Amino acid sequence: MIPLAKLRRAAKDALAYLSAQDDVDQAEVFASANGNLTVRLNYTSHIPNNGVEEPKSVESHGLGLRVAFKSPRGLKTGYASEPTGLSLEAVQRALVKARNGAVHDPEFVSLPKPDVPHISEMGDLTPAQNHPPRPGPNLHDPAIMRLGNNRLVEAGWHMMERGLDVFQASEELLSLVSQPQELLNLGLILGGDAVFLQERMAIASTHMPRVQSDQSTMVMSFATAMVETRAAKGSGWSVDTHLASFDGAAAAEAARNAISSMDGERLPSGDYRVVLGPQPLTEILEWVLLPGLRLDMFYAGASPFMGKLRQRVASERLSIYDHGAQPGLAGSKRITDEGLPTGRTDLIRDGVLVGLLSDYYNYQRILNDPQGREKLGVAPRSAASSIAPRNGFRAGNGGGRDFDSLPSIKPTNLLIEGQTPHSQEELLGLVGDGIYIGRIWYTYPVNGIAAGDFSGTIVGDSYVIKDGRLGAPLKANTLRMNDNVFRVINGILGIGSQRRPTVRWSSDQVTWAPEVALAGFQLEEICGHTEGVF
């Protein structure tokens, strides 16, 4: 990867060059380098295969410019990037593109300034300063930054071996065959991948000319296991901050869950009491609820919570906050991709909407919006600390901090907690008779974000709850969710005490999700031939 020192030097030199241009009023330089190292598992007991295959790496680096140009009609803003280039020539090429594409934006106030209130890790408000608050300590793992090909392949084989060990030692599977070698005839499948993210960035701007930089890392693993002849599927995953924490347990978990799911039962349509596991809760919150908790959605008048800041919107049992600066959490970063400190933003506290995720552009334009009070429900400047721009990031495709993207509003670590933490046994007792939903897929909003309606399919790791205990497995792909997220967050019976880091598909933000017991969850039976394991 490109060394951090080279990114810092490129940002410094580029800002100096831009500042010397007669038509440049404000400028920001963002330089980044990203690595995505992936090893894929593909084992099938009845089809020849390599087991671990497709170890690969994708690397990128470059710089992006945001520039406010002087013009007779006022400021014009332009953006451009230059891939694989950090030289002065690359800056010159990007500047030409930014100048040619510049437009008048009546909602533009300025590029980011360090004039925003800051919330400390303890939740205390620090007044705005003439310089940004000091970021926290380095949060990345140097071992992931140095990860080589051999260690990458070893990680894949370690996952694979842990999953196959579970299959080979399973008494439930051995009872189905007369000879151990006949296990292969059961159609055992184990797939998935381990992903190691390496991220480096440096930023400098007219309003914050001192170069700031950050490094961040993450390791994620995902696995799916099947016992094909018994129509059974299970999954497992892990999210870690450091290479030393990676143990390959996701594959073993997937194999155990597949074995536990053999010969599942069907259930009819109806309203059920349920326990949502961490993965379903993450899917529903991130795909359906979270867009409505972004400041840009309020500015556009598209949030379901319009005018409800500081009002009750959910069960008093529920609290949700985003924390990008807490050490030990996999999504933490020292600074945003706008050069501002990360920190804690409370979104829902004891059922009350108390804050929103924001970047600097949307923060400034809501402060200057004549309809800001109507949109938020309170005067924007009185709520400045609740909408401070702690979440302006340039998310890349498949992870990373992408020089080729403009900042937008992205969560870091989304944490869910309850007033009274419950054990899993207590949650099952609150449900009595119902369903434990362990994994869903293809979750999406229906009728737009503002409606809150969503749909999705239960695809594994799910069980009937009988008399407060886990019972028979639920047959995969036989029940579809058709419910409303606002009914979900207001129908909470209890929230678990243990939170699990969870990453949904195509995202590198982390939700620290507990199990949640709900009343009146609407499920619809899927009929026909769609219930096969896939």
Image (cartoon, rainbow, N blue to C red):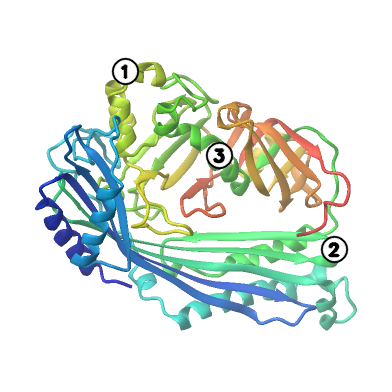
**Residue 471 on image: x %, y %:** 79, 48
Report the side of 497 relative to 488 (left or right).
left
Q: In this view of the protein, which residue sits in the foreground, 159 or 130?
A: 130
Crowding at dot 3, Cα within 10 Å, few <14 / some 14-19 / many 20+, comes out as: some
Mark 2 residue crowding within 10 angstroms, few (<14) / some (14–19) / many (20+): some
Q: CA distance from mark 2 to mark 1?
A: 62 Å
Residue behind mark 3 = 285
Which residue position holds label 2?
Answer: 230
The residue pinned by badge 1 equals 370
Q: Is residue 229 left or right of residue 253?
A: right
Instruction: State the image coordinates of residue 394 (x, y, percent, origin top left).
Output: 37, 51
- x%, y% of residue 198? 38, 66
* Closest to the observer, 475 or 3: 3
Q: Amino acid at mark 2?
A: Arg
Q: Could you tell me which residue is drawn at 17 percent across and 56 percent down?
A: 211
Q: CA distance from mark 3 to mark 2?
A: 32 Å
